[in-house]
């Protein structure tokens, strides 16, 4: 599904990612943890094609395609989804409109016809129920004036509608209270199957109580410093990140 | 040097020979002409003309628009009649044959020279007098007067279809709109001239009596060789609310002067504007709101989207007279430059002589936000569609005041077409915007 090899990326000539290797197979859930500023969002941004980041070395293969050669929108249409750490407010554009445009762009890319308006409504209503969102939300402008938790829930709602093959969640759990966290986890778990993969970036192991990962990786100093299973997340919870950062520095 | 008025002088001479009007009126026209001729066309050294040049007018050998009807063929963009009451104006003249056969109850339309000087609204106090008004008065043969009786509520807009056809015509529409007490009406003026190199120099005078609601939209989709110069002057009485929406899409040059007198306690004005210049177009909005009495309110919100090779100008002024306490005035102008060759000059001004007031103003100039574009692209929208969506969202909020759904759908369609032109002109390179030049003249308060 996804294969990252020796990935180097920088911002304004400052190297941030310094040789990432990571392979995700269909149906797997990977968690990436790491201290603030270690490059987690940079990795997510590079995957989605944010031009703020310059890839200086390495390759990324996504479903047998050279991901780095694809435009941001084509990555999305091919099934990559990024839930933003800081979702963007788009005044004047309502949620329903954006979702329809996104779904239609993907359908067109795949040679399918336009979305049926009735199907869309039926689908979105059931997904909104799942995410515990009220229907007036559809008419509201994208993220404009939303609380932090509402924005995160909106990202997951978009994800459940777009049904990606690979979802990258950048700290979707940060700043959520426990009820909101459960709703977000429910949204993610509703999509889990053998075909779909997840890359969950998180700062706290708490999320992993609700979404069980197959693998846990620690990002430190621009590299994956350690990989393991859920036990690693619990160890991090106990011991913090310092010991890993020290191991890497050695 | 001022632009030459040689062609205009020739035009006035031939107009004088041919006109058939009462002598008091021809004398008044000669006086107007003299005032204009002594001053000449405005140029950059005149106040309020710093950013807008009329030199190209000196090169057009205009002739006064002849009587008769204008062909509608070339510009099919017209709001359909069954959802509105159409009042057609061809080359600045009322044409009943192209208008709706009947007018709603409470509405009357007359056209012609006013019976005498007193009745002519010549005596009305203009918020900001201009020599172009003198030029209009010199050439205007017909005053089109729309009167709305007290207690009239209109379920459909009055749609004033300003049309021109022909070449190098000088059209001088003169419109007087009188709204009675306790009315609720929507007036749409649509300037959609098809004529080549025509100059439309219009004067619109609106008076709103007490306790009325008036929605007035000026939509401009003139032919791209047109010079569109319209001065609108509005008197708002106590407890009345006047809402203006001005939309510029067509023309080569469009200059809109909008002056508002808030003349009674409880009078309010809301002014919205959308201007989308590109490809050599120059759109200039000058608004001036005078708070003459206490407890008056005004709000201005203009949104400019300037495409490749476009130039936008906004100058909004609010004047609060010494005794006008407890007033509220808000003014903002936000602009998006889509290209490095796009230009905007913006200057909101406040002049306050009372001390118990609430005023705020501001202007912004920026490019489309890269983070927002990336967000939309990450959802599968192309860069082009992401731009389109952001720009559309940016201007859409100014349409919120359009009450008639059918008319809003008509506007959406027009805007959509124009936006496609604007975004399709842009290169698809993501980094092309980074060196855009900043705004000139983003004005601080000069209180
Ligand atoms: N857009 C940016 N501009 C400048 N510096 C950035 C940008 N994005 C990230 N950085 C820098 O790159 C490093 C990694 O940031 P980030 O990937 O956001 O870390 P994380 O998500 O792990 O907290 C930090 O030092 C940060 O300051
Ligand atoms: Mg981050």
Image (cartoon, rainbow, N blue to C red):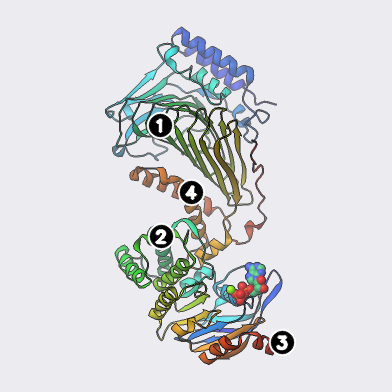
- Image coordinates of residue B364 in percent, x first then y, are 59, 48
Comparing labels 1 and 3, the label whose residue is closer to the camera:
1
- At x 71%, y 71%, the residue is A13
In this rendering, do the residues under marks 1 and 3 share a single chain?
Answer: no
Q: Which residue is mark 4?
A: B395
Labels 1 and 3 touching (C-beta < 8 A)? no
Labels 1 and 4 touching (C-beta < 8 A)? no
Q: Is mark 4 within 8 Å of ligand 1?
A: no
Vertical order, B32 against B215 (above or below): above
Labels 3 and 4 touching (C-beta < 8 A)? no
Judging from the image, mark 1 belongs to the subunit labelled B
Q: Which mark is residue A249?
A: 3
Vertical order, A69 against B196 (above or below): below
Q: Is mark 1 within 8 Å of ligand 1?
A: no
**Element type at mark 1:** loop
Alpha-carbon distance for marks 1 and 3? 74 Å
Instruction: Pick the residue in front: B73 or B170.
Output: B170
């Amino acid at each position: 599904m996804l294969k990252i090899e020796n990935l180097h990326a920088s911002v304004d000539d400052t190297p941030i990612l310094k040789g990432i290797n990571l392979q995700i197979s269909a149906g797997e859930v990977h968690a990436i943890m790491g201290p603030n500023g270690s490059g987690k969002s940079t990795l997510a941004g590079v995957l989605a094609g944010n031009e703020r980041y310059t890839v200086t070395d390495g390759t990324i293969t996504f479903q047998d395609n050279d991901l780095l050669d694809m435009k941001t929108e084509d990555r999305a249409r091919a099934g990559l989804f990024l839930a933003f750490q800081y979702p963007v407010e788009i005044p004047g554009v309502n949620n329903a409109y954006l979702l329809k445009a996104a779904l239609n762009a993907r359908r067109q890319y795949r040679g399918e016809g336009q979305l049926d308006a009735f199907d869309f409504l039926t689908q979105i209503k059931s997904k909104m129920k799942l995410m515990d969102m009220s229907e007036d939300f559809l008419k509201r402008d994208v993220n404009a004036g939303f609380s932090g938790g509402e924005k995160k829930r909106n990202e997951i709602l978009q994800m459940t509608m777009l049904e990606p093959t690979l979802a990258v969640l950048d700290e979707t759990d940060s700043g959520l209270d426990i009820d909101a966290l459960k709703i977000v986890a429910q949204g993610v778990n509703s999509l889990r199957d053998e075909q779909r993969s997840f890359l969950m970036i998180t700062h706290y192991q708490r999320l992993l109580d609700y979404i069980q990962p197959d693998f846990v990786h620690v990002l430190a100093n621009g590299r994956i410093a350690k990989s393991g299973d859920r036990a690693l997340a619990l160890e991090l919870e106990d011991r913090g990140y310092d010991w890993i950062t020290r191991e890497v520095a050695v | 040097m001022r632009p030459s008025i040689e062609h205009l002088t020739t035009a006035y001479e031939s107009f004088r020979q041919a006109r058939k009007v009462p002598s008091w009126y021809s004398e008044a026209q000669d006086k107007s002409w003299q005032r204009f001729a002594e001053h000449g066309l405005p140029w950059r050294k005149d106040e309020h003309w710093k950013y807008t040049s009329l030199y190209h007018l000196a090169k057009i050998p205009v002739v006064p628009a002849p009587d008769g009807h204008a062909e509608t063929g070339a510009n099919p963009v017209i709001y359909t009649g069954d959802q509105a009451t159409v009042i057609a104006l061809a080359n600045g003249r009322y044409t009943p044959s192209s208008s709706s056969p009947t007018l709603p109850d409470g509405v009357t339309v007359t056209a012609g020279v006013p019976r005498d000087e007193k009745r002519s609204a010549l005596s009305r106090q203009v918020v900001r007098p201009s020599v172009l008004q003198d030029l209009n008065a010199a050439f205007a043969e017909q005053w089109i007067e729309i009167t709305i009786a007290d207690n009239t509520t209109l379920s459909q807009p009055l749609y004033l279809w300003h049309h021109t056809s022909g070449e190098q015509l000088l059209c001088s529409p003169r419109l007087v709109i009188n709204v009675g007490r306790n009315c609720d009406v929507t007036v749409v003026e649509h300037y959609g001239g098809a004529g080549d190199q025509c100059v439309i120099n219009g004067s619109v005078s609106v008076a709103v009596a007490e306790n009325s609601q008036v929605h007035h939209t000026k939509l401009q989709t003139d032919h791209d060789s047109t010079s569109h110069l319209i001065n609108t002057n509005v008197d708002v009485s106590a407890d009345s609310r006047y809402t203006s929406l001005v939309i510029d899409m067509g023309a080569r040059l469009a200059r809109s002067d909008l002056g508002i007198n808030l003349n009674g306690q409880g009078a309010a004005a809301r002014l919205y504007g959308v201007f989308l210049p590109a490809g050599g177009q120059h759109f200039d909005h000058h608004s001036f709101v005078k708070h003459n009495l206490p407890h008056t309110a005004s709000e201005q919100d203009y949104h400019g989207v300037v495409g490749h090779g476009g130039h936008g100008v906004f100058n909004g002024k609010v004047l609060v007279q010494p005794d006008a306490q407890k007033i509220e005035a808000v003014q903002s102008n936000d602009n998006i430059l889509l290209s490095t060759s796009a230009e905007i000059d913006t200057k909101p001004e406040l002049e306050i002589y009372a001390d118990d007031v609430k005023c705020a103003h501001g202007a912004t100039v920026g490019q489309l936000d890269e983070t927002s574009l990336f967000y939309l692209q990450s959802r599968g929208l192309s860069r082009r569609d992401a731009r389109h969506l952001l720009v559309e969202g940016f201007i859409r909020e100014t349409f919120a005041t359009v009450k008639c759904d059918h008319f809003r759908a008509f506007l959406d369609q027009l805007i959509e077409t124009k936006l496609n032109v604007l975004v399709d002109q842009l290169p698809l390179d993501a980094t092309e915007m980074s060196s855009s030049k900043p705004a000139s003249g983003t004005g601080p308060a000069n209180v």
